[in-house]
Image (cartoon, rainbow, N blue to C red):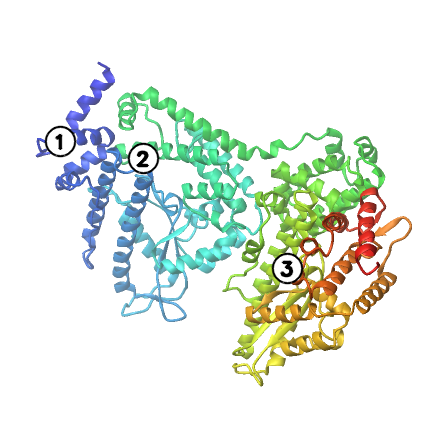
Amino acid sequence: MDPHRQDLDAFVERALARIDGLPDDPDLRQRLRRVAIASDFAIDTLVRQPDLLAVLADGDGAVPLPPPVLEPGRGEEWPRQLRRYRAAESTRLVWRDVLGLDGIDATLAATTHLAETCLRLALDAVEEDFARRHGRIHGPDGQVVRLVVFAMGKLGGGELNFSSDIDLVYGYEHGGESRGESIRPLAAEDYFARLGQQLARLLDERTVDGFCHRVDLRLRPFGNAGRVAVSFAALEAYFQREGRDWERYAWQKARPVAGDLEAGQRFLEALRPFVYRRYLDFGALDGLRAMKAMIAAEVARKELADDIKRGPGGIREIEFLAQALQLIRGGREPALREPRLLPALAALQAGGHVEPATAAALAQDYRFLRRLENRLQMLRDEQTHLLPSAPLDRERIARGLGHDGWDRLARDIARHRARVTREFEALLSQREQQPAVAGDIAGYWRALPEGGSADTLAAAGFQSAAEVDAALRDFVRTPSVRELSDASRARLDRVMPVLLQASAPATRPLQAIRRLLAMLHNILRRASYLALLDEHPAALARLVDLVTRSALLAERLAAHPLLLDELLDVRASGPLPQREQLAEACTPPLDMDTEAALFALNEVRQQLSFRIGLATLDRRQPACDSTRQLAWLADAVVASVLALARRELEHAHGAIAGAGFAVLGYGSLGGEELGFGSDLDLVFLYDAPPNAYSDGARPLDAPRWFARLAQKIVSLLGAVTGGGRLYEVDVRLRPDGGKGLLVSSLASYDEYQRDRAWTWEHQALVRARCVAGDAPLCAAFERIRTATLARGRDPGRLRADVLSMRQRMREELDRSDGALFDLKQGEGGLVDLEFLAQYLVLREAAQCPDLLQPRATRPLLEAMAAAAVLPEEVAAGLGRAHAALVAAGLDCTLDRRPRLVPHDPALDAARATIIEAWHGHGPGG
């Protein structure tokens, strides 16, 4: 027989012999044998509390034990009550864990709940006793101010070890002095410090009954040298001035667990910008590297290779890996702000930041190591993470975990730790995956501004090497570069040679370098943006490609560095959001004020339009799809701005009962063919009962109320914020143009379209649609539009009007010449195609009502083919021509070039198709 097994059997028999009155029940004895193998602590508790065995045997301890009642005035009994309760409940957890009745997730959650219960019982008792001697602190509103106990680490994350310290930080919301019947008032700082120390002693001090929970207060500001309890104001000031990366990791898991929980939650909300930055924060990896280096030094110094928490491939590496990814992206993705490890991994997987197989493997590794860690601690209720060296202890751990001896368990441990190490090292080695850079380029960059030679750039393949050299020297001399911190300068010195080498083959390298330097100039003040480029090779490569091909996107990156995040956002390379998702993304939270909502809306619009721009640039979707998505995005923005404007106006002047308002989109917005940077052609309608007034303290009649609403919308859309400007607005297409009222009543709009509108205004109405507002009024607009467009017309007069307007526009706006073609206004360009479609709608809609529904060019052409207004092959050819011209136009816009292009066979064929249809089926025939 295996000698280790013999030793184990003898040990178990001795353990069971210690329990008095053990029933002669083979099943119970077998369960007790398994518990005895795993935990001396559990057997010791059963010896001290013999009644506990009957409770566990009956129902296998499925129901938690009732907590004690700590009676006021009997403080001498509290330590014993808490320690016996903690020991008994912990033994119940051992019983259920060892017998396989609870998985590790349930055990960790129950251990957390036990610590929280003890904390709350102890704090409530100590607080009442303290108040009798010193009174209570009261806030500015007269309410009692309570201590807030923040749980950090495993307790904060809801995953406490069986025998772990509990990491706590004490805070309080308001200062002041205690008052009451006491004759010994205390200032808040002393009051809460003494209260917190009493709480820690009640839990931590070892007595004849052991301890309840070891308390560690070192995570507070300045550690042991800092105040025991800190006001929220002082905490906020500390994190603003002194907060370090490791504290961001620590406070990521913070959670109020005792005292004033609501105040604690308010503080964590205020602290969130310190923990989670608004941008992709790859600077968090430097903090992780520093922590890893310190831990590695400690492991080496203390020979902790067998430490399954701190050693290579240990629990902490899994935690740090998940936390680093959370800190990098959590500012932009609230779903990642999860203090618990396993739900955090699931959120990272759902967000596309961890591969499903990796997330599943890490979750498996984590559960394996945490279960092993718990068994190490259950053995003797010790806070240990070291694998045992004694043969009997090894045998007990292995057998208790269901392994056939220590060797088999050791192999499993090594396999899990090796897998964790691979994933952790991969996260930190991204920087090392940057493409190799020629030593001459790196040396040239570091020698600037006084040293280095343009010859190095020429040898690297740069055209215009002298001009590039001059631009780089000017950049290095700027205060932004000269005043960089050592860490940021080191990042720049790693990034710039890669950017230079990647830019050398560009068609226009000087232009690319100038765009890159403009962008870099704006991000140098934000260390995390440099960190993003430094840590992620894909971002660097994507950046060079983007600035080389698109001046517009390069300018937006320079103006709004937040968009750098889009270079790495997995959503940026996936399917683009549809109309409903765009509307949801552009809906500001109800609790935001207008200024904050406008800022957030600007950022969202910038990000989404940038994402559409990337998809267009990469040819991941047709240009016509991009123009449609840009129009949907504008719809969503206008709807949100309408809601903000209406809220402001109703707050100031009240609402108008029974009234409605609608925003009409004309031109490229109405036709769902919006370009990058296009104006919005808007017309405003309202409908209200006669003589209606708003019901606020400062009432307005309906015309003035709705005029102010329209003015507010135009103002908010055009307002410049830190996130940029939403849209320029053109309101000249309203009835009577610049001479007319900004907002029209429904009746006056109907009358205008019926009796006074010009033919070109009815042409514009072909593309008009309601983009935001009240559904009944939008439906009324549709009825007016239908009646207007379906009116019978004199064909000769219609043809003459359309030709006259087109000729006038061409004379004023067409910039074509012998070498270049104006994509929009030139003969056979986009406006010719729009006029052709509008002419056919006005001519045929009375007989073909199906032509009235589509607004966009492509669906309108398809409707004309279905109605036999155009031959199918002509409509299809016009659709292809339209797609070609739109794509060419977007290419020009993305590179900030005028929409004037050289003649080429594809564009000449598209033009010819439009010209032929213009003369064969349109007003030119």
Q: Nearer the viewer, residue 170 or 33?
A: 33
For the point 65% across and 54% down, the residue is: 628
Quarter containing the N terminus: top left
> On the image, numbered disc 3 is attached to which residue?
634
Tell me which label, 1 or 3, sits earlier in the chain: 1
The image position of residue 742, as x and y in percent, is 69, 75
Rendered view: 135 above or below 434: below
Residue located 58% across and 84% down the image: 690
Mark 1 lies on residue: 18
- Residue 374: mark in rendering: 2
3 vs 2, front mark? 3
Q: Which residue is at the far top? A: 1
Extreme residue in the bottom direction = 691
Name which residue type carries label 1.
Arg
Using the image, tell me which numbered label, if any, was put on residue 134: none
- Residue name at image x 44 percent, y 58 percent: 267
Q: Secondary structure at mark 2?
A: helix
At label 2, which amino acid type do we have? Asn
